[in-house]
């Protein structure tokens, strides 16, 4: 295994939420968006991050990119801590880590032309480049992501959603980063366009040796692109494994339920299979359940689950699970 | 296959296609609005009147026409022969020249006030909104405190203590005009801050002040411009009120407010032209600004109609 490009160690993200109806000086309540998340990502590989909405996927991604403050833990880039850097070095670090966003139109400044948008990271990190050099690089990058360079002076609202996402990808790749964090890059797009964008990301990854952190709530997209998959629930990473291993041999009860919820495009097969459906809602991250956060909805929960937070254990084959009862199957439905 | 390829090559080699910016769209919408265009034309005519007026006026605004002094009601009424096109004021000075001069002052006050509010208010509000937290709290509480002081009282005090001068008037109007604008800009900044393109810029490593200037201010400008056009008339009204109280610009300089005040006090003497001429320009200018402001709002923010 090569040295990790990016590693997070016990990363926590906590937001302060003002108490409703409280005094201005009453202490804010804490919302634990991410709790002690540890991840590793090797250069040129893809890590998929799945979980239902509210599970803290985006907060984890933003902590890695640096747009959300980290309350505890470390983000290591090639072994050096990013969090401890001063503001100027953190900004310079932005060259290596770029981000692609969920809503493509929202991610583009409506008052700027495509050329200006794509050129912004270049102007930030390479202020010595001449106007002509920037123009040439932007044109080449637009061509690379499948946009006509002649459209350089157009504005974002003149493009379709898929094209806007290509512009966002061009902006992310113009500084030749080593890691691109994709925060649900395809969930706002039409299905046919989704495949195009995912394939484009894969092509670019092969060409430029990019590492991708690919976030989605749709497991079928993630399994297509990822080498490894991490599953998040209520701010905690509950299971990580190689993509194939995780899909064929899920061990955590939440992962099992997640995989069971992916529809099979065949009515007979769909009817025939047994689907453990999760009951209830995601608990509030302001007041997470004691012990295992998943116990309130877990089909194999028992009294001991409420006592201690289950540690992440290695069960062989580079498969990590945060459930001590992972080898048991769900009890038959009553 | 080959045909499509060559078409694609042609397109790729072609000169960049000029995109229609949001500004260009807004301009087209604005010029489709008849009332707004009429308002704009009126404003241009009033401006032309203020700029060209001094060169075509047969009389100077300071000189007294001794021939009409004893008989203002008869000899001082508006006429083409005497050269007093708008008539004269109670002491025999040419009202056309004085209206031109008053228009200059009033427009200047309105535009300077609006400019101060646009520059100071927008920057102040954008900075407060963007940085948020304690900085935002302190900056906006300062605005609250300044707003809670009765501005007219401060303005009158300023003019009384430091003497009546054009500079003091500008300072006084500048002090109050940016407060509302700062609040509006801050509110807009708060909504813009949640946009993903701001986050993208932060993630890329763009400096905070560059983000404010490059991403926040251009997206604020629509709202700011609309509010500024509506602010010009209210600045003119402030100044008129101050002049009406007799605290505005000093003789022989004058403004619409001062002229209207003079005209109003002579209303019962049968010299109504002294009131109607400055009032006419005052009213059409206010209407012009309001129509242009409405037109701009519809043009820049078509969703809000």
Image (tube, coloured by chain):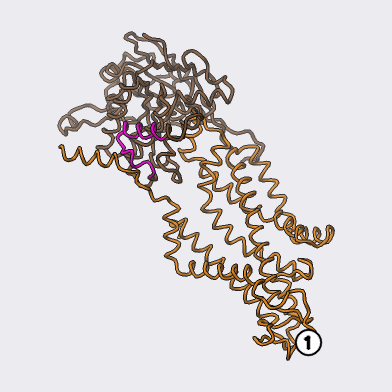
Chain colours: A brown, B orange
Quadrant (top left, top right, bottom left, bottom right) of the C terminus of chain A = top left
Quadrant of the image occupied by residue A43: top left
- Looking at this view, is A239 or B37 the one in front? B37
Q: State whether residue A304 is above or below residue A121.
A: above
Going 73% across and 58% down the picture, which residue do you hit? B151
Q: State whether residue B139 is above or below residue A54.
A: below
- Percent across and percent down for residue A134 are 43, 33
- Looking at this view, is A5 or A119 the one in front? A119
Asked if residue A83 lies left or right of residue B235, the reply is left
Going 34% across and 11% down the picture, which residue do you hit? A318
- Looking at this view, is B133 or A302 the one in front? B133
Going 78% across and 70% down the picture, which residue do you hit? B252
Magenta region includes residue B84: no
Q: Which residue is mark 1?
A: B67
Quadrant of the image occupied by residue B97: bottom right
Task: Report helix, strand or loop for mark 1.
Answer: loop
Q: Which residues are drawn in magenta?
A: A135-153
């Amino acid at each position: 295994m090569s040295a990790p490009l990016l590693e997070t160690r016990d990363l926590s993200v906590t937001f302060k939420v003002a108490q409703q109806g409280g005094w201005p000086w009453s202490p804010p309540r804490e919302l634990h968006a991410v709790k002690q998340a540890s991840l590793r990502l090797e250069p040129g590989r893809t890590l998929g991050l799945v979980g239902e909405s509210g599970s803290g996927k985006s907060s984890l991604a933003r902590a890695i990119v640096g747009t959300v403050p980290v309350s505890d833990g470390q983000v290591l880039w090639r072994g050096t801590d990013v969090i401890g850097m001063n503001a100027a070095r953190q900004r310079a670090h932005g060259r290596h880590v770029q981000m692609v966003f969920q809503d493509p139109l929202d991610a583009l400044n409506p008052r700027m032309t495509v050329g200006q948008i794509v050129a912004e990271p270049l102007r930030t990190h390479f202020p010595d480049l001449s106007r002509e050099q920037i123009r040439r690089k932007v044109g080449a990058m637009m061509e690379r992501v499948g946009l006509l360079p002649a459209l350089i002076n157009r504005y974002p609202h003149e493009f379709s959603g898929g094209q806007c996402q290509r512009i966002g990808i061009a902006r992310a790749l113009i500084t030749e980063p080593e890691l691109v964090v994709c925060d649900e890059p395809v969930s706002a797009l039409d299905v046919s366009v989704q495949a195009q964008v995912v394939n484009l990301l894969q092509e670019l990854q092969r060409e430029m040796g990019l590492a991708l952190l690919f976030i989605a709530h749709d497991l079928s997209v993630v399994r297509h692109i990822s080498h490894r998959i991490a599953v998040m629930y209520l701010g905690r990473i509950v299971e990580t494994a190689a993509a194939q291993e995780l899909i064929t041999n899920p061990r955590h009860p939440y992962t099992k339920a997640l995989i069971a919820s992916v529809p099979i495009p065949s009515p007979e097969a769909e009817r025939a299979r047994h689907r453990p459906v999760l009951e209830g809602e995601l608990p509030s991250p302001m007041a997470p359940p004691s012990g295992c956060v998943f116990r309130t909805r877990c089909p194999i929960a028992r009294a001991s689950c409420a006592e201690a937070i289950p540690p992440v254990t290695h069960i062989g084959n580079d498969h990590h699970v945060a459930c001590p009862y992972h080898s048991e199957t769900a009890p038959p439905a009553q | 296959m080959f045909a499509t390829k060559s078409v694609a090559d042609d397109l790729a080699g072609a000169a960049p296609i000029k995109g229609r910016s949001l500004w260009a769209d807004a301009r087209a919408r604005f010029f489709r609005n008849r009332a707004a265009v009429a308002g704009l034309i009126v404003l241009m005519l009033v401006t032309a009147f203020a700029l060209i007026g001094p060169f075509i006026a047969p009389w100077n605004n300071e000189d007294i026409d001794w021939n009409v002094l004893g008989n203002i009601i008869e000899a001082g009424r508006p006429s083409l022969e005497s050269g007093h096109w708008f008539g004269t004021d109670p002491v025999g000075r040419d009202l056309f020249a004085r209206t031109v001069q008053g228009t200059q002052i009033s427009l200047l006050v309105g535009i300077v006030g609006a400019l101060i509010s646009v520059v100071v208010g927008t920057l102040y509000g954008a900075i407060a909104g963007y940085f948020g937290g304690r900085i935002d709290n302190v900056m906006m509480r300062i605005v609250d405190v300044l707003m809670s002081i009765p501005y007219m009282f401060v303005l009158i005090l300023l003019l009384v203590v430091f003497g009546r001068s054009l500079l003091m008037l500008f300072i006084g109007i500048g002090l109050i005009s940016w407060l509302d604008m700062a609040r509006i800009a801050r509110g807009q900044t708060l909504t813009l801050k949640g946009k993903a393109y701001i986050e993208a810029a932060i993630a890329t490593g763009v400096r905070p002040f560059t983000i404010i200037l490059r991403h926040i201010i251009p997206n604020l400008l629509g709202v700011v411009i609309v509010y500024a056009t509506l602010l010009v008339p209210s600045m003119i009204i402030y100044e008129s009120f101050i002049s009406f109280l007799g605290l505005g610009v000093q003789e022989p300089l004058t403004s619409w407010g001062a002229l209207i005040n003079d005209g109003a006090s002579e209303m019962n003497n049968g010299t109504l032209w002294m009131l109607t001429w400055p009032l006419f320009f005052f009213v059409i200018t206010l209407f012009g600004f309001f129509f242009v402001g409405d037109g701009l709002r519809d043009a820049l923010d078509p969703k809000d109609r």
